[in-house]
Image (cartoon, helix red, strand yellow):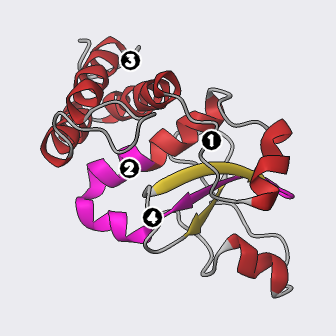
Amino acid sequence: MRTGILGSCLLMAVMTCGVGHPAAAEVAPDGGRPIREIPVPGLPSGGLSAYDQWGPVIYIDPQLIALGGAVFEFLRLHEYGHHRRGHVTPRMAYMFATNPYARAWITKPMELDADCYAASQLARRSRSAAEEAARYFERAQGPFSGAPFYPSGFERAAYIRHCASSAPGSSLSR
């Protein structure tokens, strides 16, 4: 199974071991320009969008694959959404240079916007995929949020359903 996650070490290891520029996935999950995805087992947030000296990067915990295809794909697309919607920009590279996992830039509206991006992308492919992601947040978080700047699981699920149903070309909007 191809996950699109490339590389085998953290960005800091890549920069210090002389391997050079990490490669991007050949095809982005949203059909746009590929963004490098670097696996970080045990990453507390599961996924994180950032910039480094080579450009946009997504750190993602490869253990999330165990959540299932649609949920894992939603989480990947969520991180792509932060880049595609302009939440993470090259001007923020200075912040990531000192802490590649910085999260100070995240706001609740940005999280919901990235969720909407991911839900819209999924809904174009499959009626059940976006619903599966919504159910995941209901079960995993319910009334709680992962951090002060995250919406609750119930808020996320409702927003995912709303965005999926109104996405142009969505199998849900037919």
Which of these two is toward me, 36 or 95?
Answer: 95
Q: Secondary structure at mark 4?
A: loop
CA gap, disc 1 and disc 2:
24 Å
Q: Indicate the position of residue 131 as horizontal and vertical percent values.
A: 19, 33
- Amino acid type, mark 2: Glu
Q: Crowdedness of circle 2 by 10 Å Cα count: few (<14), some, many (20+)?
A: many
Q: Which residue is mark 3?
A: 169
Which-is-in-front pick, marks 3 and 4?
4
Q: Which residue is mark 2?
A: 73
Q: Secondary structure at mark 1?
A: loop
Above or below residue 65? Residue 57 is above
Which-is-in-front pick, marks 3 and 2?
2
- Amino acid type, mark 1: Ala
- The reply to whether the magenta stretch includes residue 157 is no
Q: Which residue is mark 1?
A: 104
Q: Indicate the position of residue 137 as horizontal and vertical percent values.
A: 22, 40
CA gap, disc 2 and disc 4:
9 Å
Q: Secondary structure at mark 2?
A: helix
Q: Indicate the position of residue 60 as horizontal and vertical percent values.
A: 50, 61
Q: Which residue is at the far front? A: 148
Lower sequence index among marks 4 and 1: 4
Write down the region rendered in magenta: 52-75
Q: Secondary structure at mark 3?
A: loop
- Amino acid type, mark 3: Gly
Lower sequence index among marks 2 and 4: 4
Q: Which residue is mark 4?
A: 3
The N terminus is located in which quarter? bottom left
Q: Crowdedness of circle 4 by 10 Å Cα count: few (<14), some, many (20+)?
A: some
Q: Crowdedness of circle 1 by 10 Å Cα count: few (<14), some, many (20+)?
A: few
Which-is-in-front pick, marks 3 and 1?
1
Give the residue displayed 63% in from the left and 32% down from the top: 84
Lower sequence index among marks 3 and 1: 1
